[in-house]
Image (cartoon, helix red, strand yellow):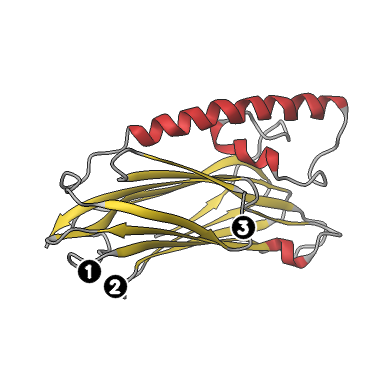
Amino acid sequence: MVSVKQAGSLSNAKRPLGCINTTIVFGFKTSIHSTDLSELVFTFGRMLASLACFVALASAVAAAPAASLAVPAGFTVTGITFTGTGCPSGSTIVVSTADKSAHTATYSQFYAEGALGIPVSSGHLTCTVSLAATVPAGYQLGIQKIEHRGYVELTSGAKVSKSSVYTFTGSTTPATSSANYLGPASQDIVTSDSYTAATTIKSPCGSNTALNIVTDVDYDTTVAGASGYIAEDSLDIHFQFLSC
């Protein structure tokens, strides 16, 4: 699934106090904004919004969409791991439903940026999320929905991109998703990938597996004087269950 978007510009260059943008306040570099008094007040407001947003995310996970089949007895997620430059140890938080059919991860350091004086390595970050699962006999796991939320702030001529690959361990069929954003821009971004029982990738029948989500964010600009960043703030994962 591919989407190319010409991002719109907002009159206020500061990031709005939306739920999507909250976690970046804990990890963002001060090179993006000035540090005058108004900025400090704005940043404090974003920190308060972060706390409120985390509660909202937990509520959203609890209200996960209905799966194709009910969650089968014996299904569980035994572990969730994060690896990569965009999700170092201590930079993620996970909220899960009681039946383990839905999960929300939030990030504090998953952003790619570019500007004069910023190392090229800061323009590409990656994160692999792996959800190990026990699947009972007669069932397969599928993806019902994966939703990425984030933010872009770009000057004219700046370009960023985000791409994801979804796979189940033991299955060779991947699903992919990508989006490109062009400056000028200062806005929330959402990439939502939904699947039916017929279109989802599937885990092997009755076999323990892991859903692997590999996401890359890139600052792709070579235009002189351009600058900006793309941030991945949170990730929603909803499983569906299929008979086999």
Question: Decide: marks 2, 1 in contact (CB < 8 A)?
Answer: yes
The residue type indicated by label 3 comes to Gly
Q: Please name the residue shown 35% across and 33% down the image.
A: 62
Label 2 secondary element = loop
Residue type (three-letter) at the residue carrying disc 1? Pro
Q: Quadrant of the N terminus?
A: bottom left
Residue 49 found in image quarter: top right
Residue at position x 61%, y 35% from top? Answer: 22
Residue 219, above or below 42: below
Q: Position of residue 56 (x, y in %)?
A: 47, 28
SS of the residue under disc 3? loop
Which image quarter holds the C terminus?
bottom left
Q: Which mark is residue 171?
A: 2
Q: Residues within 10 Å of mark 1 (few under 14, many from 20)?
A: some
Whole-percent x, y for residue 173 in the image: 31, 72
For disc 3, the marked residue is: 86
Q: Could you say where residue 198 lies in the image, as x and y percent from the top left?
A: 18, 59
Please report whichever mark, 2 or 1, sits nearer to the chain's N-terminal start. Answer: 2
Q: Secondary structure at mark 1?
A: loop
Q: Is residue 119 left or right of residue 181?
A: right
Q: Is residue 57 left or right of residue 224?
A: left
Above or below residue 158? Residue 173 is below
